[in-house]
Amino acid sequence: MSKPQKSTVKVKRFSKAFVWAHAVNAISFFALYITALPMYTEFFDWLYPVLGGPEGARLLHRIFAVAFVMPTFIWVIFDFKGFKLWMKELVTWKKRDIAFFGNFVKELFGLRFDHVRQTFFNAGEKINSLIQIFTAILIIGSGIPMWFSEYFPRALVQWGYLLHNVGFGLAIAVVVGHVYLSVVHKNSRPGYSGVVTGEVPAWWAKEHYEEWYEEEVKKGNFPDIDANGNPKKPTSPNKNKKKGA
Amino acid sequence: MVEINLNRRQFLKLSGATAATLAVVELGFDTKKAHAATKEFKIAKSTVTPTICCFCGVGCGILVHTKDNTVVYTEGDPDNPINEGKLCSKGTTIRQLYTSEKRVKKPLYRAPGSNKWVEKDWEWMYETIAKRVKETRDKTFVATENGLTVNKTEAIASLGGAALDNEECYLLAKMMRGLGVTYLEHQARI
Amino acid sequence: MGANPAENHPISFRWLTKAKEKGGKIVSVDPRFTRTSSMADIYAPLRSGTDIPFMGGMIKHALDNNLYHKEYVAKYTNASFIVKDSFTFEDGLFSGYDESKRAYDKTKWAWETAEDGKPVKDETLQHPRSVFQLMKKHYSRYDVDTVSKVTGTPKEDLLKVYEAFCETGQVGKSGTIMYAMGTTQHTVGTQNVRAFAIIQMLLGNIGMPGGGINAMRGESNVQGSTDFALLYDTIPGYLTAPKAIPEHATLAAYNAKETPPTGYQSNKPKFVASLLKAWYGPNATAANEFGYQYLPKGNKNYSHINLFKAMYEGTLEGAFLFGTNPVVGGPNAGKEKESLSNLKWLVAVDLWETETSAFWQESAGSNPAKINTEVFFLPACSSYEKEGSISNSGRWMQYRWQAIKPLGESKPDIEIIHELATRIKGLYKNEAGPQAAPINALYWNYGEGHHPDIDLVCKEINGYDVNTGKQVAGFAALKDDGSTCSGNWIYSGFYPEEGKNRSKNRDNKDTGMSNYLNWAFSWPANRRIIYNRASADPSGKPWSKDKAVIWWDDLQAKWVGNDVPDFVPTKAPTDPTGTDPFIMNKDGVGLLYAPTLNDGPFPEHYEPFESPIPNAFSSQELNPAAVVIEGDFNKRGFKADYPIVATTYRVSEHWQSGTMTRNQEWLSELVPHMYIEMSEELAKEKGIKNKDEVIVTSARGEVKAYAMVTKRFKPHKINGKNVHQIGMPWHFGYKGIATGETANRLTPHIGDANTTIPEYKAFLCDVRRA
Amino acid sequence: MATEYVKFVDVTKCDGCRACMVACKNWNDLPAEPQDFLGSAQSHVKTTADTWNVLQYIEHENSKGGLDYLFRHSACFHCTDAACEKVCPENAISYTEFGTVVIDHEKCVGCGYCVNNCPFEVISLKEYVDKNGDKYRKANKCTMCTDRLEEGLQPACVTTCHTGAMEFGDKAAMIKKAEERVKQIKDRYPNAMVYNPQGVGGTHTVYVLAEKPSVYGLPENPKVPTSAVVWKDYAQPIGKMMIGATTMAVVGAFITNKIFSKKTNGHDEDGGESHE
């Protein structure tokens, strides 16, 4: 079965701040993950020599821990609107969000599925975001007393170890899924370019985030397109310019 | 020369293994090669010499473990009936009499008016001290006093000696009295 | 009492804890609640310097309540002796006092003797001039109420201690008194010990296992160094050092003066002759009084305080220091340090740079440019880098083998002494004349080479027949005709035959009553309990089966038992002197009344040199026989400026002036700081908080240190008023790893009337926040 | 395990001589680390990486209004159920045949989890410097001289203790002795007790205390921290499972995707290609 060629028209999905924030977040997360692995399970003890011994691993872990805390600030400072939107979306849950999941599972395993109309973030992303926020708080919140254990009550440090560990497990699980969807899974792949360049194919945006897309079209920010991404009517180049500047 | 019988040492159990350990300590060779291969048991190859504590007057027995020209451990002498292998904090620490950084290892001389020590060799020290003793002694020697033979010098003093061995004390008393020293005192007085 | 064995002689305390497990009671009497007190069954506080009232009260308690051991007292002590009428006691003064000399005429205190020289006795002890009755009268003044007012000890605590200790007067029970410098370092130090001796004799505790009075000696060989006479007033074996007096003009005169007609001391001339033979060898002949005239003869008190006074006044030119550190350990240490700069030369033999050998340095507060003393520092090696023997508090002479070669260029003291002696002798070799004669005559023959042959030294100490070269078996074999030598008669017998040095004995089998006769050697003659004849009753049977030491065996016609008898082994109890256990005393009995001491035959309370209260017992404030050095060398403080009583003490982890321990990392870690212990009450009065820095001042100096505010010090209730006391360790100085200011800058240059031991343990001071 | 051994510390026999402290340093070659003045005879606030046992000195006004001067040799308890062993992520802490708990420095990475989870706060990290001048850390604590035990000798501190306050021997016998001792001393110390806390499964250092544990700064009922139990017994295994499961899911999804893509699409990854 062959499909018609998709249009190359792109729309702006993410701000530069978000792109940076996401990148820092992702890199530091993986760095943290790798530097934590040998300690999490002796299965990965071979990583110690690679990381410069336990001391090196700890140092790197701490450097990236600081990096890991930064993205929120980057986004807040440079793209407060985007951040606000994200926050707003996260607390907004409608029926279609629930419906999303049924189709999501089908899509995940490459089965036939229908796109449920979604806003800027789809329900999956919202779940991902929520869990990630939750685990980040868990990890950062427990990591601080672990790092500066002499300034915290012992009980807090002790619970910190547990929470850090739990947060780690959760985060990994979520991130693995998140990464899979973005990098590996064919249907979300275009989204990947979104977090790298900030732009995504218009058709894909419309397909995945129909409600958001149409909203933007109404605002005149995005071209109205058909299923293949070809404009239904001409657009001015500056229409797909970044809105938040 | 010294027979050390460590049979009062507190062992966990009197098994064959223990007897082997005893042999290790006594004879100075290690039968537990497997252990030695990784981390050698601290006193496995040490030479054990009994001594008596140099601190208070109780007279506790101590074993000095030496190995590779240094003192590796000191512990109570289990055979000594005074302390039965037990020691206080000072006795336990006598290892550091040898290992302390602060030990003076060379003769030192301070010239009149000088603000520092100068290292000298023993020969020079002995010769110079002997000369000083003779000078002072000859100058201040009193052979007779009120018709009595007194053969003394009241210009030289000797202090201390409570930590010396008996044999040393004996020679010191003999030398000082031989010189005619009357100001002869040690820590029993203070 | 006067000791804190849990902290200062921990391994001795091991045996107290064992006794406690067997039902024994530990009593701790100390101004401060110490670790010993914490382990004790009874603790009684007392103000420093009030031991005699405390013990006087106990003596009275024992006498009033008939708790003394009657037969022992009647037979084995001089309780029955009748004292001459010339002995009197009034308002703190015994008869015969000469105020200008601060000395007594002791002949006034003599007892009545029969024509044969034997004392007149009344064994019923009822004669009003008997020692017993005089003693009873003397201590009748020490009633519990007065004692409590003076010592500050609560009355109920006094009674608890008295009752507990006097129980040991019962046959089958024994009690011991362990004392240390808390007892001796007072102007009445000797009499403090005398008070212990009196109560122990009254309770029949001398010569008994588990009895006696035990001097807890502070240095490993202070026993041996005393035996070997590193003291101005003796020569080895406790023989009197000859003095520049007509009575000592010749050996014969000396012997006549110093030898009692009876008792074991009547053998003295043999020991003197043998010592002279050891020292002067072939140069000691009958013709030259065995070299007696070579010995120096002094004419004054040359003790520590006077030694430093002479140095202060510039009459001393040179000094040798063998492992001693008076700038930290001497009394009024600031002055002792100052005195050192008057020396032309100083030889210090030590393992470490001490505060004394470095007295000229800027860090000592000196100006090196102005100090012209030449200082020779000779590095000695430690005790296990050489070999030789030492004698402990129990007179056990134990050998120390060499474990390792001396560190660096350090050398054994014996080698240093030997080299110096050899070289000094060398300088005089070709000289004649009075200076050269004694040195040329000195017999110094310990082998070739730099290191003396220690075996030769040992053999000479034990003694041998100078004609055959054969070792003597013991001091009984010594002769006064110059045919034997012995460097120290009391040790004679430790090396009885070639190759047999008994101090090396290591057979630790208990030979009975924990005497371990085959472990090491105990002088005299390997006896472990001296005066052990007193452990048996006059008929020769042990007072109690459980406490049997020696007993008379009729069949063998000799004394047998678990120890070497301290008695003529074949002298039967039926012999006229067969019931006289105290063989070293002229009359063979213990001296409840001791007319030989300088400050009275009975211990009497006098206040310390510096005291916050007047003497409650008489108008004599200070021991009348204590010699006071006036002037700048020894400033005196008074209550108005210095209202607080102070004392010094040691801690478990440091030793003496700290030279040995403050240079060791682990011990310095345990007690790294100088501190002043004080009560919460005093701290509150002075606005001092725990860990504050405080300054303690006395008339002689000041010391800055941390405050250790503790519940373990309480103010003494003296006559209804609070008298504060503080305490401090005296180990610190500015050298070494653990440093701190020196407590002895505060202490006075005043000594006991008999021994001139300084009064470190009671002086006045004031405290304030730094 | 043949015999289970414990170190029995009877603090009421201790006279505070601190030979145990130096004996430990002497045997284990630990350096000195002088501290500031603490206002009492005590040298260290608590055990450290270079001071594996500390003698506590406590002035305590007892229930009768009298003064007790209490001493306690404090060191690792060698818990039967040791929190440090539980939390160590590297399995560097293990139980020996003697029941002692030891740290293997080869494995230790200096993370400090044991330090912060020990209910008795006896473990400390020590910083070392290697040949290249790089710093690294290891956890340190009393080993109960396991190296000596292996050679049939008793721990150095026990060997030197002169008052008999410390003994090393068969667990049952020692506990019996402790219980009898408590009965003996009840008159003098009414609050005396055996301290062998069951919250950590009992310890291999068993105390007779003269007073309540709190007087010595000891927890009345120490436990392996709940957080550590949840962490190590639940969170960690679940976490590992979750990672496994997620990985499996991803792998599964990837494979199924491939399979279905092949079936449904001529060329897969239709969306991404053009946007490289």
Image: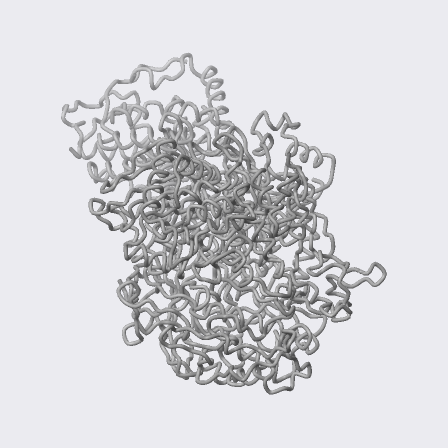
Q: Indicate the quadrant containing the N terminus of chain D: top left, top right, bottom left or bottom right.
A: top right
Is C544 placed above or below A108 here? Answer: below
Q: Position of residue B2 (x, y in %)?
A: 64, 36
On the rendered structure, is A126 left or right of C19? left
Name the residue nearer the viewer: C437 or A10. C437
Rendered residue at 60%/41% (across/down): C459
Q: Position of residue D59 (x, y in %)?
A: 47, 65
Q: Position of residue D19 (x, y in %)?
A: 53, 50
Total marks in image: 0
Rendered residue at 62%/42% (across/down): C466
Residue C24 can be seen, yes or no: yes
Colour scheme employed for the rendering of this structure: one colour
Q: Residue A209 occupies which quadrant of the picture?
A: top left
Residue A169 can be seen, yes or no: no
Name the residue nearer the viewer: C392 or C624. C624
Q: Residue C562 occupies which quadrant of the picture?
A: bottom right
Name the residue nearer the viewer: C609 or C341. C341
Q: Indicate the quadrant containing the C terminus of chain D: top left, top right, bottom left or bottom right.
A: top left
Name the residue nearer the viewer: C377 or C328. C377
Is C412 placed above or below C667 here? Answer: above
The single residue placed furthest to the front in the displayed view is C287
The single residue placed furthest to the right in the displayed view is C555
Q: Position of residue C297 (x, y in %)?
A: 43, 55
Rendered residue at 69%/70% (across/down): C173
